[in-house]
Amino acid sequence: MKTKKIVITGGPCAGKTTGLVRLDEELTKMGYRVVFLNESATELAMNNISLKNCKNNYEFEKNILKLQLEKEKLYMQFCESLPDENVLLVCDRGSMDCKAYTTEEEFKRLLKDFDTNEILLRDNYDAVFHLVTAAKGATEFYTNANNKARREGLQEAIKLDDATMSVWVGHPHFRVIDNSTNFENKIKRLINEICLFLGIPTPLEIERKYLIERPDLNLLASLKNCRKVDIIQTYLTTNKNEERRVRQRGINGNFIFTLTNKIRVSNVSRIETEKRITEREYLNLLNEADTRLHQIKKERYCLMDNNKYYEIDIYPFAKHNAICEIELASEDEKFTLPNFIKLKKEVTNDNRFSNHSIARKIPDDLLN
């Protein structure tokens, strides 16, 4: 089958929500159609169905497992019907996670009731990636604020993380992403591991930004290795040390919506979280737009050329210029811009060309 099915799992407050958003952005650039299957337990909890509403823990986990298996079956059928050559079905938790929330006797009963076994449940996925809870090694970032269904304290989070990790041990492609680096690099490591599994070049880590002449859009559209994305980014009202923005991203009327929060915790570090939101949530948040800042609208052309990934941003107010970004493996990596790109100057370290700065005041260099 053309569709690969993977699981992103982990302990509470591990970074799954942000990881799923970043994964969608990176793999879409590389030609993948990424389809998400939401976490069943959270989906039920957000609709007022939880353990306290059920007769007992066994019945609750039984219904979650049934919902999970039915959704996976339906989603796989849908994915196989898509015209895309490369489809990735990403499950926010998988069927084996129920073992971490049941006793040994309850789990054996589940296997009997579903006429299955542990191997079939566990190895029904092509790969499994476990994100370790922030309660292990990053306690200062552990919070319940970004998940209304989360109730666990630090010690319970650690216990659940250990249990969740153990149920997947033995899967032929099981990877654990710990907290040995900062959160941004943790997410990059997750994406790198998934790319390695898929056999595609890993996303690069060092960005360089250039002011270029506005390219021929017809030429870009004709390139087989180039994909266009429409982006609308709106900054919201915030506190002094916080930045909030919503983004609409897609093409031809098909969009995904994300909310990004950045909180500065010191002069050199900040917490950044991203999560997908519904269109209704997005429209409601637009009411909180910071009217001091412009809404940023742009066409982004994601281009792969000579094994390098480029993002070319076309702004409607810039008739002659555009912005081009490239991600590199190292600061001294050699590369050559595509021959149709006419370079004006590098603006990597020019803060005037950050999205937030452009929203405040459009640089003259971009306009002229």
Image: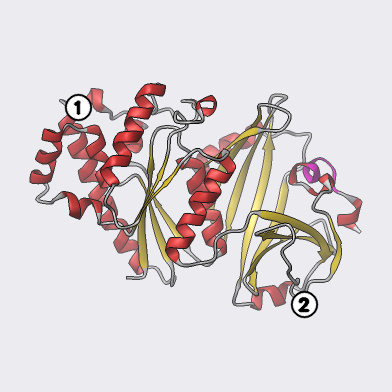
According to the image, label 1 marks what residue?
Answer: 54
Residue at 85% x, 43% y is 361
Q: Position of residue 29 (x, y in %)?
A: 57, 62
Q: Answer yes or no: do the residues labelled 2 and 1 have beta carbons within 8 Å?
A: no
Viewed as shown, does residue 327 lie left or right of 112? right
Region in magenta: 357-362
The secondary structure type at the circle numbered 1 is: loop
Q: Is residue 259 in the magenta section?
A: no
Camera-side residue of 221 and 208? 208
Query: How is the structure coloured here?
Result: secondary structure
Q: Amino acid at mark 2?
A: Asn
Viewed as shown, does residue 322 lie left or right of 160? right
Q: Is residue 358 in the magenta section?
A: yes
Where on the picture, by quarter, is residue 26?
Answer: bottom right
Residue at 28% x, 47% y is 169
Residue 368: mark: none
The secondary structure type at the circle numbered 2 is: loop
Residue at 34% x, 67% y is 80
Where on the picture, by quarter, is residue 322?
Answer: bottom right
Residue 120 in sight from this viewpoint: yes
Quadrant assignment for the C terminus: bottom right
Q: Is the residue marked by circle 1 packed among few (<14), some (14-19), or many (20+) residues within 10 Å? A: few
According to the image, label 2 marks what residue?
Answer: 339
The total of numbered circles placed on residues is 2
Viewed as shown, does residue 320 lie left or right of 181? right
Q: Amino acid at mark 1?
A: Cys
The residues bearing labels 2 and 1 have C-alpha atoms spaced at a distance of 63 Å
Q: Position of residue 283 (x, y in %)?
A: 57, 40
Quadrant assignment for the N terminus: bottom left
